[in-house]
Amino acid sequence: MGFKDKINKFVSTHTETREAHSDEALKTRYYKAMKDKAFNEVLTLFGQTPQFEVKSSSTERGEIIVIGKGKRKVFLVATIIMVSPLRTAVDFAVTTETSLPFDFGYSAKVIKEIYQKLDQRLEYVGSGLGA
C-alpha cells in the first residue's frame, strides 16, 4: 500500500472492497459455497450482531443493505455473487456517518471485522482471484 493509499484510507468516510485493492485485507474475498448459502450466512451474521440492522435484502440481486448502530453509524451494502459452481465472491461498501470529512479508517475496520467473522462461517478460498 502506497503513501497516497494510506492517507486516503484515513481521510475518507467511505471504503469498499474490490478485486485489485492496494490493501490485501480489502480485496474481494471468495468462499467455497453456493450463492444462497453465502447469502444466508452473511444475512445471519448481520442478524446475530446487535449493532447491525438489516434494512433490505434481495436474493436475486445478491445484495444486503444494513445500518450499523455501533459507536458510529454506518451504511453498509454487501454484495454476494456466484462466479462459478462452489465459488462465491463477497464484497462490502461501507460509509460512515460523521460530521467530519473523514472517519480515521473506521469504515475499513468494519469491513475487516466482518470478513473475519465470515471466514469462521464459510470456507475461505482466497482474495482478489478475479483480477
Image (spheres, rainbow, N blue to C red):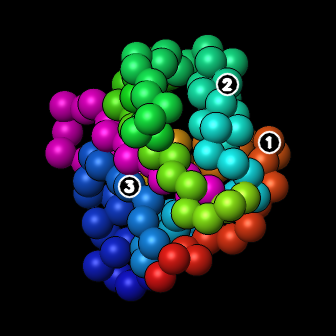
**Quadrant of residue 18 in the image?**
bottom left
**Would residue 50 be found to the left or right of residue 1 on screen?**
right
- Residue 46 at x, y percent in the picture: 60, 25
Q: Residues within 10 Å of mark 3 (few under 14, many from 20)?
A: some
Give the mark nearest the N terminus, 2 or 1: 2
**Amino acid type, label 2:** Thr
Q: Is residue 106 visible?
A: no
Q: Residues within 10 Å of mark 1 (few under 14, many from 20)?
A: some
Front-most of 99 and 16?
A: 16
Q: Nearer the viewer, mark 3 or mark 1?
A: 1
* CB atoms of marks 3 and 1 within 8 Å: no
Q: Which residue was labeled with disc 1?
A: 121
Q: Residue at x 34, y 58 (%)?
A: 10
Front-most of 31 and 100?
A: 31
Q: Which residue was labeled with disc 3?
A: 16
Give the mark nearest the N terminus, 3 or 2: 3
Q: Which residues are magenta?
A: 88-105
* SS under mark 1: helix
Q: Nearer the viewer, mark 3 or mark 2?
A: 2
**Amino acid type, label 3:** Glu
Q: Is residue 12 visible?
A: yes
Give the mark nearest the N terminus, 3 or 1: 3
Q: Residue at x 66, y 42 (%)?
A: 38
Distance between the alpha carbons at the discs numbered 2 and 1: 10 Å
**Quadrant of residue 1 in the image?**
bottom left
- Residue 50 at x, y percent in the picture: 61, 14
Q: Which residue was labeled with disc 2?
A: 44
Above or below, 21 relative to 97: below
